[in-house]
Image (spheres, rainbow, N blue to C red):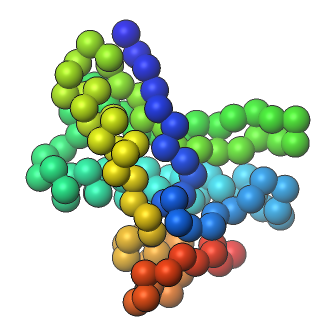
Amino acid sequence: MKDHLEIGSTPWNETGAQLGQPNYAELGLHECQIYVAQLIRHYEASKKKHLPKGCIVFVKVNHHDFGSYYEVHVRFDDEDEAAVEAAYWLESNAPEFWDDQARKELGLKPNLSNQSSNFLA
């Protein structure tokens, strides 16, 4: 059976695009797509293996009274032990900051001090 976990829209100590700001749909989706790639890199670098086939990191659109917003989720087969382990690992080990590749893709300056930054649009 399929289950999913919400991971968020950016690393937990970063400020991302906000619903209601100009171009949010484009910026929020772009950030989430970059975050998906970063989460996969983070898992593979830490665990020295690929995500199991039963574990998929994806962008989900959520509809709200004030508009639609984006978040990264991980879907997994709850009957696949490796997929369950990977999904919960991603949730509990989500990165604090954008990594160098994500910062480059977002058009941010390198983060030499490991302090959070805002999305530059």
Residue lying furthest right: 65
Using the image, determine if residue 41 lies above or below residue 120: above
Q: In the displayed structure, does residue 69 sit left or right of residue 86?
A: right
Q: Is residue 53 visible?
A: no
Using the image, determine if residue 102 lies above or below residue 84: below
Relative image position of residue 34 (x, y in whole percent): 47, 59
Which one is nearer the viewer's eye here, 99 or 53? 99
Q: Quadrant of residue 119?
A: bottom right
The structure residue drawn at horizontal position 26% and vertical position 13%, both measured from the top left corner, is 79
Which quadrant does the N terminus fall into? top left
Using the image, determine if residue 83 lies above or below residue 77: below
Which quadrant does the C terminus fall into? bottom right
Residue lying furthest left: 48
Which one is nearer the viewer's eye here, 56 or 88? 88
Relative image position of residue 110 (x, y in whole percent): 44, 86
Number of labels in the image equals 0
Residue lying furthest front: 92
The structure residue drawn at horizontal position 69% and vertical position 62%, both measured from the top left corner, is 17
Q: In the displayed structure, does residue 54 sit left or right of residue 12?
A: left
The structure residue drawn at horizontal position 57% and vertical position 52%, both measured from the top left corner, is 9
Q: Is residue 35 visible?
A: yes
The structure residue drawn at horizontal position 37% and vertical position 45%, both measured from the top left corner, is 92
Q: In the displayed structure, does residue 33 sit left or right of residue 84?
A: right
Q: Quadrant of residue 100?
A: bottom left
Relative image position of residue 44 (x, y in whole percent): 21, 52
